[in-house]
Amino acid sequence: MMLIALIRPVPRSIGNCELTHLDRQPIDIARATAQHDSYRNALESLGCSLEVLPALDEMPDSVFVEDTAIVLDEIAIITRPGALSRRAETATIADALALRRRIVAIEAPGTLDGGDVLVAGRQIFAGISGRSNAAGVAQLRDAVAPFGYRIEPAPVSGCLHLKSAATRVGPDTVLLNPEWVERSVFGKLETIVIDRSEPFAANALLVDSTVLYPAAFPETARRMESRGIALKAIDASELAKAEGGLTCCSILFRG
Ligand code: CIR
């Protein structure tokens, strides 16, 4: 079965992106685009088939497609992003995914960002954050329960999304910043704690059995390598200025 990566180019307006925990710094669009191209190439080299949606230049955060949908083998959930400025991003994602999955949409008063949803087999950890609320998580639960998925709510604080604080780096292993989400949320899953000097280091993108990982976090990278995890380093520093990590720039699903 093929792994598909849905992505969208860096918009010209990215400099006006939402920022919650970072101060605004100028973003060099040419450099951000070059980094996005390397991301794209890395995904292809790891065996993904790319589906590139048209750029949405008037929507500053539209490169961060992860937040707009959660795609499982059985169903796709179109989110209702917590940031008002991002709500319009979902329409074209819904159109693209409707060709591949049955679609369910999160509705008001629910809000949910894909960055808050971490899937580990039949367990789905759902961040309750500044972007995703309990009503959104409850709608997610109703949508996926028929397929045997269990939702574990995960309160996050101090960061944007659950996946700023924790991502999967192996079938049963989570990379974690324990300052932003409690370790106990993950129950029996193994955890690797990030190096404290690298607070943003918990966002890694697992593709098959390789972890695509920002070059900016060498200490945490070493911790993973010493646990036998295969990493592929990538420079995503310009996209990081928009408070985006590696997971946010794609939606990966089986085709
Ligand atoms: C935002 O605040 O919505 C964007 N500037 C960054 C979104 C990052 N998305 C993600 O981590 N899933």
Image: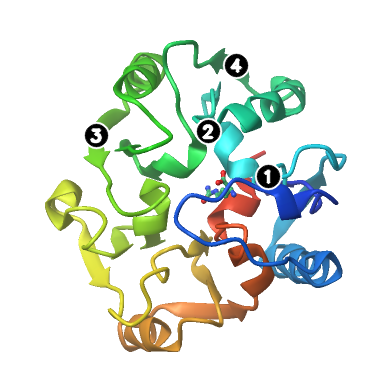
- Numbered circle sitting on residue 211: none
Location of the C terminus (image quadrant): top right
- N-terminal of the pair, mark 2 or mark 3, is 2
Q: Position of residue 89 (x, y in %)?
A: 70, 30
Q: Which residue is mark 1?
A: 61
Q: Position of residue 178 (x, y in %)?
A: 21, 63
**How many angstroms separate mark 1 from mark 4 (CA)?**
23 Å
- N-terminal of the pair, mark 3 or mark 1, is 1
Residue displayed at 61% across by 61% down: 24
- N-terminal of the pair, mark 3 or mark 4, is 4
**How many angstroms separate mark 2 from mark 3 (CA)?**
16 Å
Residue extending farthest top? 108
Q: Give the amino acid at mark 3.
A: Pro
- Numbered circle sitting on residue 70: 2
* Camera sees residue 166: no
Label 3: how many residues lie within 10 Å, few (<14), some (14-19) or many (20+)? some
Q: Give the amino acid at mark 2.
A: Ile
Q: Give the amino acid at mark 4.
A: Ile
- N-terminal of the pair, mark 2 or mark 1, is 1
Q: Secondary structure at mark 4?
A: strand
**How many angstroms separate mark 3 from mark 1 (CA)?**
25 Å
Residue 101 is left or right of residue 194, and the answer is right
